[in-house]
Image (cartoon, rainbow, N blue to C red):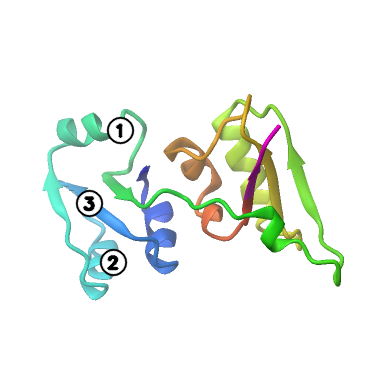
Amino acid sequence: MIIYGKNIIKEAIKNKRPIYHLYIDKKFKDMAFLNLLQKKKLIYHFLDKHQLNEKTPNHHQGVVAEVQEYNYYNLDEYLSPYSLQKFLILDKIHDPQNFGSILRTLATTDFDGVILGKKNQVLLTGAVAKAASGALEYVKIFLVKN
């Protein structure tokens, strides 16, 4: 999965999501971000803006990462007959920005997660991660058959 933007990548690092490749714009000037990468001993490569734009055409703030795909949770393993659980059920959400906004809002609640159908639904992409502003790392997402 390709993710982009400083905040999303910071949250991925904070939550120990495996990062396979990390690319930084040669003109990147955020020393605090670069210090974080060095502190975490992450290897990164400097690219020019054109090369970064080939990785993703979206607004990336000079930072792009290839990370481990999101592992959806198994609803059957998570459900408990001994406690009240609250889930948001989404169906036919096609816009990644809307989906990301929903995840961002859900991260501030006491819901146990979100249930998505596998068909006719935007799944997790870099655009969803960007719109979620890091919330993807905090919300349990369950993928079920429609």
Q: Earlier in the sequence, mark 2 or mark 1?
A: 2
**Does 128 appear above or below 94?**
below
- Indicate the secondary structure of the residue bearing disc 2: helix
Viewer-closest of 85 and 103: 85
- With 2 as the anchor, is 88 left or right in this view? right
Q: Give the alpha-carbon distance from disc 2 to disc 1, as whole Å.
A: 23 Å
Q: Earlier in the sequence, mark 1 or mark 3?
A: 3
Residue indicated by mark 1: 56
Among the two numbered marks 2 and 3 on one chain, the one whose residue lies closer to the N terminus: 3
Residue visible at 55% across and 32% down in the picture = 96
**At which x and y percent is residue 79?**
76, 61
Name the kind of residue labelled 2 in the image.
Answer: Ala
- Towards the viewer: 14 or 120: 120
Quadrant for the C terminus, please.
Answer: top right
Q: Quadrant of residue 34?
A: bottom left
Indicate which disc residue 21 carries.
3
Can residue 28 be seen?
yes
Within the magenta stretch, is there residue 145?
yes
**Disc 2/disc 3 C-alpha distance (Å):** 19 Å
Q: Amino acid at mark 1?
A: Thr
- Disc number placed over residue 32 in the picture, else none: 2
- What secondary structure is found at the residue carrying circle 3? strand
Report the magenta residues as a range: 142-146
Residue 26 shows in the view:
no
Q: 10 Å neighbourhood of mark 3: few (<14), some, or many (≥20)?
A: some
